[in-house]
Amino acid sequence: MRVDHNYWDLGHQTAGTGVRVILEGTEANVKLVDNYNYRAYSSGRRHEYFGGHYNRSPVLLQVPSDGHWFVTIDYGGYAGRGKAAVQVLPN
């Protein structure tokens, strides 16, 4: 089952890079995923991620290893909608 989501392509990031996600409006699932897991997630397959379900903002995440990374935001199938902004923080 495919998940309706928004995503931000962060490009290549190094381990330890911080990512700030600002949520407005409603709670959401915020996931930091590498390229392989983004493809799995977007096609509805099992995937691994960093993050979780958040109802407070900002969400601060840290890139765990060098590679190509994405941030995804979904509302878990609920009717909630909101706005979000994603910022890569300088090391």
Image (cartoon, rainbow, N blue to C red):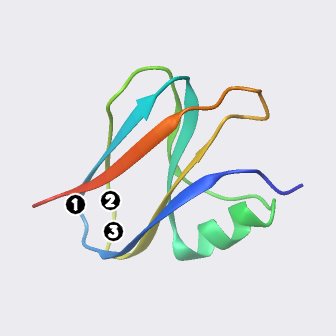
**Residue in the image at 70% along x and 61% along y:** 41
Q: Residues within 10 Å of mark 3 (few under 14, many from 20)?
A: few
What is the three-letter code of the residue carrying label 1?
Answer: Thr
Q: Please give the residue where the numbered disc 3 appears in the rendered image.
A: 65
Badge 1 or badge 3: first in the primary sequence: 1
**Screen quadrant of the C terminus:** bottom left
Image coords of residue 44 (percent x, y) = 81, 59
* Residues at circles 2 and 3 in contact by the CB criterion of under 8 Å: yes
Find numbered disc 2 in the image and state the secondary structure of the residue it sits on.
Answer: loop
Mark 1 or 3: the one toward you: 1
* Residues at circles 1 and 2 in contact by the CB criterion of under 8 Å: yes
The image quarter in which residue 75 lies = top right
Q: CA distance from mark 1 to mark 3?
A: 9 Å
Q: CA distance from mark 1 to mark 2?
A: 5 Å
Question: Please, is residue 57 above or below residue 77 in the view?
Answer: above
The image quarter in which residue 36 lies = bottom right
What is the three-letter code of the residue carrying label 2?
Answer: Val
What is the three-letter code of the residue carrying label 3?
Answer: Ser
| In the image: residue 75, left or right of residue 10 | right
**Residue in the image at 33% along x and 68% along y:** 65
In this view, the residue farthest toward the left is 91
| In the image: residue 17, left or right of residue 3 | left
Q: Residues within 10 Å of mark 1 (few under 14, many from 20)?
A: some
Q: Please give the residue where the numbered disc 2 appears in the rendered image.
A: 63
All told, the count of numbered labels is: 3
**Residue in the image at 79% along x and 34% along y:** 77
Q: Please give the residue where the numbered disc 1 appears in the rendered image.
A: 17
Question: Please, is residue 8 above or below residue 20 in the view?
Answer: below
Find numbered disc 1 in the image and state the secondary structure of the residue it sits on.
Answer: loop
Badge 1 or badge 2: first in the primary sequence: 1
| In the image: residue 29, left or right of residue 79 | left
